[in-house]
């Protein structure tokens, strides 16, 4: 397989690198579980910076197409069953479409150091503090979802914003940042004591866990969101089209 990038092509280098990696994923040579060339070697061969290559790799890791193990290497992920939802909406839009009036029970804003997963997603140093927004939301009868959002420092949020406003309305109108792409992971788990107390459940009760990766128009990461839902209050609808 020809591993090269056309530096005269106007297409950004990280996009070309991403396309090359996608071709490698489809190559039987790597589909068998063989590791890709290491980042230093591959970046040198492609004549691009390691950060440019890592940007492309990170995107495919978060799409679930690649697996990267520290100190070992990067290889094609094993096939998994997943569903994608069309017509992504913000939480407020979702609830408005269902005719549900949302109440905010708690709202906390802090500055924290990101863990390794978040730092890798944002492609920032783990020593760089980021804004953390926690919200407990639900209907008048009681809360049904606990959100934790982390934001890339590039967005410019200060923590003084009125977060009772729709979040993406704040990003778009106040910071010229448009949330365009959302990638999500849905799983089931049991509520620990902390989540059970927030969602007014018995400890160990089933909850739905949604992890959302949000990108702007340039497909740059802007939000890392964790949502914990009461299982009796949340339905996830998937629309699929056969092509």
Image (spheres, rainbow, N blue to C red):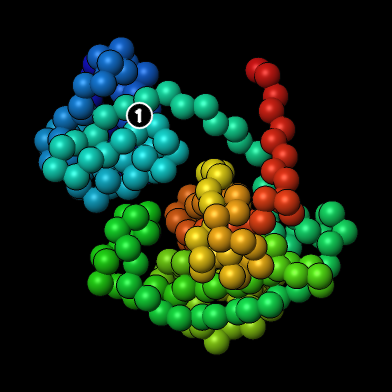
Question: What residue is at 65 percent from the left and 39 percent from the top?
Answer: 85
Left or right: residue 100 versus residue 104 is: right
Image quadrant occupied by the N terminus: top left
Above or below: residue 145 compared with residue 78: below
Above or below: residue 58 compared with residue 122: above
Image quadrant occupied by the C terminus: top right
Give how far across and how far down residue 196 sits, in percent: 58, 64
Number of marks in the image? 1
Q: Nearer the viewer, residue 105 or 171?
A: 105
Question: What residue is at 55 percent from the left and 87 percent from the top?
Answer: 160
Left or right: residue 175 versus residue 64 is: right
Q: Quadrant of residue 184?
A: top right
Question: What residue is at 76 percent from the left and 73 percent from the top?
Answer: 103
Q: Quadrant of residue 72?
A: top left
Give how far across and how far down residue 150 sits, in percent: 47, 67
Q: Quadrant of residue 186?
A: top right
Give how far across and how far down residue 133 sits, in percent: 52, 73
Question: Which residue is label 1 attached to?
Answer: 77
Q: Residues within 10 Å of mark 1 (few under 14, many from 20)?
A: some
Left or right: residue 180 versus residue 137 is: left
Question: What residue is at 34 percent from the left and 45 percent from the top?
Answer: 58
Above or below: residue 84 compared with residue 198: above
Give how far across and how far down residue 45 sits, in percent: 14, 33
User: Helix, strand or loop at disc 1?
Assistant: loop
Q: Is residue 59 visible?
A: yes
Q: Residue furthest right?
A: 99
Q: Nearer the viewer, residue 50 or 36?
A: 36
Q: Is residue 146 visible?
A: no
Q: Residue furthest top?
A: 28
């Amino acid at each position: 397989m020809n591993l090269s990038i056309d530096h005269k092509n106007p297409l950004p280098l990280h996009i070309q690198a991403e396309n090359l990696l996608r071709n490698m994923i489809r190559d039987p040579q790597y589909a068998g579980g063989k590791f890709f060339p290491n980042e230093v070697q591959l970046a040198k061969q492609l004549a691009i910076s390691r950060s440019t290559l890592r940007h492309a790799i990170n995107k495919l890791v978060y799409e679930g197409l690649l697996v990267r193990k520290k100190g070992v290497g990067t290889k094609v992920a094993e096939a998994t069953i997943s569903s994608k939802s069309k017509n992504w909406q913000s939480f407020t839009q979702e609830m408005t479409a269902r005719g549900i009036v949302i109440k905010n029970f708690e709202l906390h804003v802090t500055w924290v150091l990101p863990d390794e997963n978040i730092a890798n997603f944002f492609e920032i140093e783990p020593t760089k503090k980021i804004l953390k927004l926690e919200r407990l939301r639900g209907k008048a009868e009681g809360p049904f979802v606990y959100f934790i959002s982390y934001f890339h420092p590039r967005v410019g949020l200060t923590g003084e914003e009125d977060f009772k406003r729709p979040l993406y309305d704040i990003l778009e109108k106040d910071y010229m940042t448009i949330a365009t792409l959302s990638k999500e992971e849905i799983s089931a788990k049991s509520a620990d004591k902390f989540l059970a107390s927030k969602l007014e459940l018995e400890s160990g009760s089933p909850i739905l866990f949604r992890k959302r990766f949000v990108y702007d128009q340039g497909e740059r990461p802007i939000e890392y969101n964790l949502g914990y839902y009461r299982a009796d209050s949340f339905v996830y609808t998937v629309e699929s089209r056969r092509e």
